[in-house]
Every structure is written in C-alpha cells, then in structure tokens.
Amino acid sequence: MLFLVVALLLLGIVVGTAAYLPWPVTLVVGSAIALWLAVFAGRERRRRERTRRA
C-alpha cells in the first residue's frame, strides 16, 4: 500500500510539472509510472491467487 501511495505522489508531481516539461519527457515519465503500476498490480494479483489456493 505504501508503494501505491508513493506512486500516486510521484504521478501528482509529474502531472503538476508537466506544463514545464517538454512533451517527450512527460510521456516517458508517465509511461514509466504506468508500467511500474502494471507490474505492481500483476504481482499483487499473483500473490493473492497463490494464497487462495492454499
């Protein structure tokens, strides 16, 4: 949960500074955050499936 809070905080910072950054930089940073959140969600889903089976 702490990781999710940090990710959302970083997203807020990036969105807030997006007006001052060039578009390519904003897109790269936004994509990196989205990828990190997707990996996190996938790991959480796998972890929950393992605990259900036991």
Image (tube, rainbow, N blue to C red):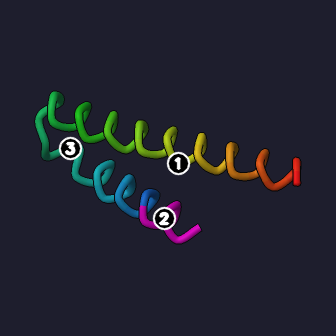
The local secondary structure at tag 2 comes to helix
From the viewer's side, name the closer residue of 40 and 17.
Answer: 40
The mark lying in front, picked from 1 and 3, is 1
| Mark 2 or mark 3, earlier in chain | 2
State the residue position of label 1: 40
Give the residue type that dot 3 points to: Ala
- Mark 1: give few (<14), some (14-19) or many (20+) Cα within 10 Å: few
Give the residue type that dot 1 points to: Phe
Give the spatial CA distance, label 2 vs label 1. Answer: 9 Å
State the residue at coordinates (15%, 36%): 25
- Name the side, left or right, on which 47 lies relative to 14: right
Provide the residue span drawn in magenta: 1-6
From this viewpoint, which residue is outermost toward the front? 54
Whether residue 2 is in magenta: the answer is yes
Percent position of residue 40, x then y: 53, 48
Give the residue type that dot 2 points to: Phe
State the residue at coordinates (46%, 58%): 8
Residue 19, disc: 3
| Mark 1 or mark 3, earlier in chain | 3
Marks 2 and 1 in Cβ contact (< 8 Å): yes
State the residue position of label 2: 3
The local secondary structure at tag 3 comes to loop
Task: Identify the image quadrant of the N terminus.
Answer: bottom right
- Mark 3: give few (<14), some (14-19) or many (20+) Cα within 10 Å: few
Give the spatial CA distance, label 2 vs label 3. Answer: 25 Å
From the viewer's side, name the closer residue of 31 and 49.
Answer: 49
| Mark 2 or mark 1, earlier in chain | 2
